[in-house]
Image: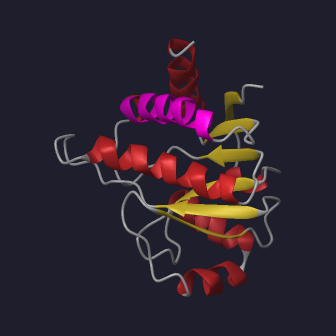
């Protein structure tokens, strides 16, 4: 069976999926945007576990429990800061999606939700980020037959339209 991939507009902290992905900063100790919202919703136990992880490098990912979230797990990944596209940003963004999927699959996650990694304060152009996200996830899912559903969880209607277009272009 092929995994169902779709884009939705929602608050990622409310999704009842096996794993959500956090667009984190390298400290893993919370921040703004999606990262701050996840930390606030999950509670102080998440911060305690993140302190034990020793941070995370750009493109890599680390997994924690979901705590007070409906999701069982949180996969924290640090996306690249956009510096014009000639500094290896795409390769690092691809690594974020690959590593997040791998860590989710290792705990038998059947459903996973991704935010739009690097498109907030990190400044990655959303059209490019969405195309990279969709193509990477579609390619990588062949390695993880246990993953049944992937959601691209968009914060705004504009972001949702961009992800829906990227998904339509890949079919």
As rendered, which of 105 and 76 lies closer to the eye? Answer: 105
For the point 44% across and 28% down, the residue is 131
Residue 168 painted magenta: no
Q: Quadrant of the N terminus?
A: top right
Residue 129 painted magenta: yes
Q: Which residues are magenta?
A: 128-143
Find residue 135 and report its horizontal and vertical position in percent. Answer: 48, 28
For the point 40% across and 28% down, the residue is 127
For the point 50% across and 54% down, the residue is 99
Name the chief secondary structure element in magenta: helix
Relative to 41, is 122 above or below? above
Is residue 119 visible in the rendered structure shown here? Answer: no
Q: Quadrant of the C terminus?
A: top right
Left or right, residue 85 beside residue 149 = left
Relative to 149, is 42 above or below? below
As rendered, which of 30 and 103 lies closer to the eye? Answer: 103
As rendered, which of 35 and 62 lies closer to the eye? Answer: 62
Find residue 103 and report its horizontal and vertical position in percent. Answer: 61, 58
Find residue 146 and report its horizontal and vertical position in percent. Answer: 75, 42
Left or right, residue 84 beside residue 117 = left
For the point 78% across and 64% down, the residue is 69
Numbered label tally: 0
Find residue 27 and report its horizontal and vertical position in percent. Answer: 43, 77
Left or right, residue 120 beside residue 67 = left
Is residue 22 visible in the rendered structure shown here? Answer: yes
Relative to 13, is 50 above or below? below
């Amino acid at each position: 069976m092929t995994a169902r991939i779709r884009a939705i507009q929602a608050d990622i902290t409310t999704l009842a999926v096996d794993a959500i992905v956090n667009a984190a900063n390298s400290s893993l100790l919370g921040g703004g945007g999606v990262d701050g919202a996840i930390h606030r919703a999950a509670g102080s136990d998440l911060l305690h576990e993140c302190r034990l992880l020793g941070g995370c490098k750009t493109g890599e990912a680390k997994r924690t429990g979901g705590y007070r979230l409906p999701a069982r797990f949180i996969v924290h990944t640090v996306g690249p800061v956009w510096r014009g596209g000639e500094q290896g940003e795409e390769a690092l963004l691809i690594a974020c999606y690959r590593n997040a999927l791998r860590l989710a699959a290792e705990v038998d996650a059947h459903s996973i939700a991704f935010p739009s990694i690097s498109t907030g304060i990190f400044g990655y152009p959303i059209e490019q980020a969405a195309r990279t996200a969709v193509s990477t996830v579609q390619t990588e899912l062949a390695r993880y037959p246990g993953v049944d559903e992937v959601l691209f969880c968009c914060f705004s209607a504009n972001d949702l339209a961009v992800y829906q277009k990227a998904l339509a272009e890949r079919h």
